[in-house]
Every structure is written in C-alpha cells, then in structure tokens.
Amino acid sequence: MQTLGLSESTPRTEKRLKSLFWPSIKTGADVDYLAVQGFWVCTIVGVFSFAVLTFMAHQPITGLLTFLLFHFGGIGVREHNPFAAVVVLICYALDILVSGIGVVRIIVTALLLSNLRATWIADNWKPESEEAALPPRLGETFSDKVSDKWPAFIWPKVKVIYYIFAFGYLALAVASLILIKLRGGSF
C-alpha cells in the first residue's frame, strides 16, 4: 500500500490541535482528513447524546432521533455538505441553551464550529493539480469502512430525507423552547 501511495502515512501539514480547532487545507489529503475528522466528531456527539438522553433522562426515542441527526449530519460533513455541518452546530447550540454551558460543551461547540469551517472550505475545494486530488477511500479496516465507504454509499440515498428530518427536528426544538419560555420557565 505504501508503494502505491495509498497508506495513511501521508504527512499532515499541521498539528492535531490546529487541525481540530482551526483547520487549513493545502492538499487533497487535508480535505479528506478533515472530512473524516468531522464525521467522527459528529458521530461521537451523537453517541454521547443518545447515552445521556436514554440512560439519564429516560427518553430513548429522543435519544435515538438525536443520534440519527448527528450521525447522518456527520455523514453529510464527510461528504462536504455545509447544510449538515450547520444543522449539527445549531442543534448543539440549542442543547447548550437548554442544558447550560460547561467546559466540555465549549470544546465540543468549538469542534463543531471548526467542522463547519472545514466543510465550507472543502465544499469549495477545486483540485487543480495532482497534489490537490483527493486520496482514494479505503475499506480495509472497520474504521475505514465506517468513515469512508458508509458515507459515500448512504449519503446520496438519504440526503433529501435528512434535509426534511433536520428541518423538522429544528422546528420542533425551537417550538419547544418557545413553549417553555411562554409558560414562564427558564432554559
């Protein structure tokens, strides 16, 4: 694999923390790396949201819907879709509005904002040279299959459904917040 240039040993053009919080894109490998990173960030947020809503708040249906929103949002991020990146950032911001702010929430919000920026840059990425070409998507390991093959396979099939689902989810969340405020409650 290394002889063909298909291994993951391509040197990164920036450090891990910088790529997490303020990514830049210089090569096609950077575009691919940031898309995979965004996919995993969104999926992990979805898993934690599912766990908290299911086991602590005893709302398994809401937990499942939230997981689906973040996971398929991550798939959209992997496929360079700015709408998906905006949706996951807005949903997480609404959650902060309801649940309160904390150090972990600030870090996750910064990661999701970074995802939005990276997705926006990647969506407008125009490979003009051989170095700018996107690397092939691998499918050797389970992680490769989940982050490379699964999004490319499923996103074209669920993109429109995700748009409708995300809009409905956001509308319901905003309506709930308005009802809470009208009844004199606090977020």
Image: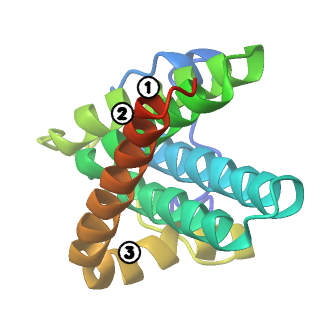
Question: Which residue position is annotated with label 2?
Answer: 116
Q: Which mark is residue 6?
A: none
Instruction: Tell me the amino acid under the disc marked 1.
Output: Leu
Q: Is residue 28 visible to the viewer in this orientation of the structure?
A: no
The residue under the point 39% across, 81% down is 154
Q: Is residue 141 above or below residue 183?
A: below
Q: In the depicted view, which residue is nearer to us: 60 or 176?
A: 176
Horizontal side of residue 15 vs 72, given as left or right: right
Question: Which residue position is annotated with label 1?
Answer: 113
Q: Which mark is residue 152?
A: 3
What kind of element bears circle 1? helix
Horizontal side of residue 6 vs 173, given as left or right: right
The residue under the point 26% across, 72% down is 159
Tell me if mark 1 has few (under 14), some (14-19) or many (20+) residues whose alpha carbon lies within 10 angstroms of its own: many
Contact? badges 2 and 1 (CB < 8 Å): yes
Tell me if mark 2 has few (under 14), some (14-19) or many (20+) residues whose alpha carbon lies within 10 angstroms of its own: many
Horizontal side of residue 94 vs 86, given as left or right: right
The residue under the point 72% across, 58% down is 47
Q: Is residue 173 above or below residue 114?
A: below
Q: Is residue 72 visible to the viewer in this orientation of the structure?
A: yes
Instruction: Tell me the amino acid under the disc marked 2.
Output: Leu
Q: Earlier in the sequence, mark 2 or mark 3?
A: 2
Q: CA distance from mark 2 to mark 3?
A: 19 Å
